[in-house]
Amino acid sequence: MKEKRIGFATRMGAIAATVGSAVGLGNIWRFPYQAGVNGGGAYILVYLLCIVLLGIPIMMSEFIIGRSTHKNMKGAIEQLTPGSPFKIFSYIGVFGALLICGYYSVVCGWVIEYLWSSVSGSLLESNPEQFPQIFTTFIGSPDRCVMWTLLFLALNFLVLSRGIQKGVERMANIMMPLLFALLIVFCVNSLLMPDSTKGLSFLFNINFDKLGWKGVVDAMGQAFMSLSLGVTCLITYSSYFKDDSNLMKDAVTISTLDTLVAILAGIVIFPAVFSFGLDPQAGPDLIFITLPTIFQQMPGGTIWATLFFILLFFASITSTISLSEIPITFLIDEYKFSRGKAIILTAVLMTVVAVLSALSFSTLGDITIAGKNIFDFLDFVGPNFFMLLGGLVTAVYVGWIIKKYVIHDQLTNGGMHRSRFVQPYITICLRFISPVAIIIIFLYYVGLI
Ligand code: PFF
């Protein structure tokens, strides 16, 4: 039986849940480590350009597709452009979401490990020099990694089984502002550290020598990852939006908040990295090495650490919930699954990917794809291939294929708002800038540039 679609109770609820999807480990774990390995300032500049020229227009496109039809991508395309072959691409989103959510849950498991050791007090007992080793030992222990990952996934699917409205909205409403406030406290703390200016100049001094094509690809993938683009997540979420929400304003608000959180995370991490002589290029380990060092020198460090990892846990689960909703809604709408059955199948598939990823630092460490272990491979292809490809399809579809009046109608809510600047801006970005930029990146992948 087809289940009734439940809208978000309030406009704020819908925005808060979408911010909840956008703000997550992408901002706090991935952005700082990517900025670190790609040399800082120039990467951030390209990242910001990607948000403005690709991210916001593609976010608006996903909103237009979802809200105009109240359907997932495949159903929406069938309704907007009957018979269009574009619907094949909706599988990219479903498949991409399964892979991304799988490896992402492993990092959520790391967050639980650090939350656990903060609560038990053991996290801050060691010497700062030992933090890298502690992290490496932890991810190298298959039992612990798999246990926390499975616990995380169980909680994720428990929330989902209670329905989108109650589960997602309530949590997102409370936790996001708190996380924001805590990051500001940590920023002030980091800025007061000796040598904090070195960290700031790493973040904001623009030096293109260190960037290269790889940095540009990373920045673009990260912009998509951070805004939850290209895997039809925002199509799915906006299919639950009410018809009077202002899509232009919402897209700008969500992107701005999301970018602010990422930059704040950078300002928390890098002054500390330089102040304590840590390695900015540490990679995925970066925050798990740096944060304990920061907490250790704060009065009441254990409490700060506990609070932070609780909020990070909530930021992460609101993102995985939105990722999980993609296959779930797809199965319900397209294959007439009951919600319960759709949740079970999604859970099984994600668990397989998650366990394989969790073991890629230990038992399955020898398995490599394109020179990367399973986790690193998924962390690369998820954002840099699936999301970019999905983004390309969305940009071309909304920019070139669907009727102009649908775009105008959705952006202005049938003429209620003005879109004099916004519509030309997104049209240029969707028709030309995004496709060209993404195609250049793909040419780079296949070695043609
Ligand atoms: N945007 C989330 C983050 O930055 O952590 C990750 C994410 C959520 C990606 C939902 C994609 C998605 F569909």
Image: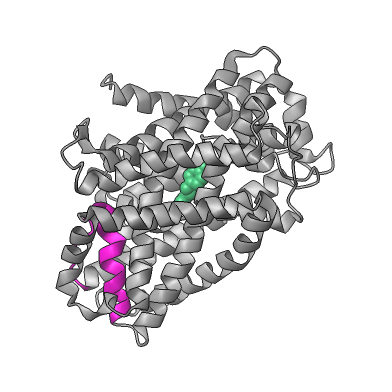
Q: How many marks?
A: 0
Q: Is residue 287 above or below residue 91?
A: below
Q: Does the segment drawn in magenta span residue 92?
A: no
**Is any atom of residue 220 visible in this view?**
no
Residue 143 position in % (x across, y down): 26, 55
**Closer to us: 407 or 167:** 167
Q: Residue 174's image quarter?
A: bottom right
User: Which residue in the rendered view is the most extreme toward the bottom?
Assistant: 299
Q: Is residue 400 left or right of residue 384?
A: right
Q: Is residue 8 left or right of residue 50?
A: right
Q: Residue 338's image quarter?
A: top right
Q: Is residue 55 above or below residue 143?
A: above
Q: Residue 111's image quarter?
A: bottom left
Residue 448 position in % (x across, y down): 28, 19
**Closer to us: 163 or 302:** 163
Which quadrant would the C terminus be assigned to in this image? Answer: top left
Kindly identify the residue that appears in the image at 18 percent across and 60 percent down: 137
Q: Main secondary structure of the magenta part?
A: helix
**Is any atom of residue 174 visible in this view?**
yes
Kindly identify the residue that appears in the image at 46 percent across and 27 percent down: 389
Q: Does the segment drawn in magenta span residue 291?
A: yes
Q: Is residue 335 left or right of residue 94?
A: right
Residue 156 position in % (x across, y down): 51, 53
Kindly identify the residue that appears in the image at 52 percent across and 73 percent down: 181
**Closer to us: 62 or 335:** 335
Instruction: Find the magenta span and give its range.
Output: 276-296
Residue 185 position in % (x across, y down): 45, 77
Kindly identify the residue that appears in the image at 73 percent across and 45 percent down: 241
Which quadrant would the N terminus be assigned to in this image? Answer: top right
